[in-house]
Image (tube, grey):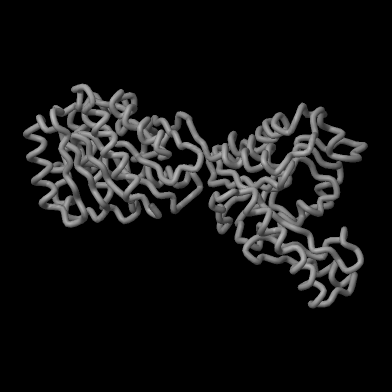
Amino acid sequence: MRFRDRRAAGRQLAERLAHLQGRPVLVLGLPRGGVPVAAEVARALHAPLDVIVVRKLGAPGQRELAMGAAGEDGVRVVDDRVVSMVRATDDQIAAAERRERPEVEARAARFRSGRPRHPLEGRTVVIVDDGVATGSTARAACRVARAEGASHVVLATPVAPEEWEDRLAGEADELVAVSTPRGFMAVGQFYDEFGQVPDDEVVAVLRDSDAIDEEVEIEAGGVELAGDLRIPAGAAGVVVFAHGSGSSRHSPRNRHVAQVLSDAGLGTLLFDLLTVDEERERANVFDVERLGRRLVDTTHWLRQRLGTPDQPFAFLGASTGAAAALWAATDPATRPWAVVSRGGRPDLAGERLAMVTAPTLLVVGGRDEVVLDLNRRAAAQMHGPVRVEVVPGATHLFEEPGTLDAAAALARDFLLDTLPGS
């Protein structure tokens, strides 16, 4: 079997890894050639992508013979069998690590180019290379991943020699290859295009892998809810939208606001709080507790989907959705960095208002007098930092020229100002 290029090989490899879909997977590419392959795997599995940077610790006088490996953050693994065979001393092992350590840290910094590193602790990790020949680098990567706390290690590659499973037995929990041909001489013989992958390409692949723009199915409250998840590359936070009564994720107003936030570098998740059948029962639209619980479930789903348990996110609710957002913000499992209400009914959150600790912005139209009064009363009941902003000339739906843009700008600036680390 031959592959057109690394991307094509990655797509075929992803098919062999389909059993991992739905699990909290982290895909790690071995630089440099393994990263374009890993990018296709990560895309198919809806998993985050990172690099795993390792350097072999060469034995004294036999640099190609690995007696261990150095990974990031000071991680070192030692192959006792090889150490015993070459009779390496502790000082010689330490000297080899000192020689390789600067290169590990320099490469990691260069490839990530400021991107945060994904933790491996407790994760299912898929280590990907464009091919396995001797297996020494793959073996080192597997051992480093285990040393860094990975709970399940999968070593995956488009092509490897027939005997690769025997050679790497025990190094990973799963070994997956698309092809294991006879007559294996070199990885490049199985690719039509197998040029060098420059550092700049690795950086670009990792940067682009951060961007997400897809339709999703969210499990919340025992049902599946349709949503649209859009996260620009390098987004510092994600805003979860909660629409109001009679609306949906297709609301042109919410989508306009979401575009403004996306242009500012924030991720957005618009989703339907109710199923089609549930929407037929008008009472469900005002069941703030049910809607709030679904927002809590959705934030849990989102963190799993992104593979980043500490991903900052905020709520943006409209009408009754604002009450649901405030209700959900009081759940200790959510921890939003901020809550924004646009033409909302925060009063419907009831006694939960006094429990909201996240910074909150209430945006109301100046001509929406009844709702403006309700927002001011609600703000007086809240104990956390809260601000009421009035958009002059706007009615409840912000349909007047320029008013929705004004509301969106207020939301954008507030979310950016309160974003952790801003």
Q: Residue 321, relative to residue 142: is it above or below?
A: above
Residue situated in front as seen by the camera: 132 or 365 = 365
- The number of numbered discs placed on residues in the rendered structure image is 0
Rendered residue at 81%/50% (across/down): 135
- The answer to whether residue 99 is seen in the rendering is yes
In terms of depth relative to the viewer, which is nearer, 25 or 383?
383
**Residue 309 spot, x, y in % from top left:** 46, 52
Q: Is residue 176 visible?
A: no
User: In the picture provided, is 346 more to the left or to the right than 89?
Assistant: left
Give coordinates of residue 119: x percent, y percent. 56, 56
Quadrant for residue 75, please give it.
bottom right
Residue at 13% across / 43% down in the picture? 347
In this picture, residue 180 sits left or right of residue 228: right
2 vs 411, left or right, is right
Q: Residue at x 43, y 49 (%)?
A: 311
The location of residue 275, given as percent across then percent down, is 32, 29
User: Front-most of 345 and 149?
Assistant: 345
Can you tell which quarter of the image residue 316 is in? top left
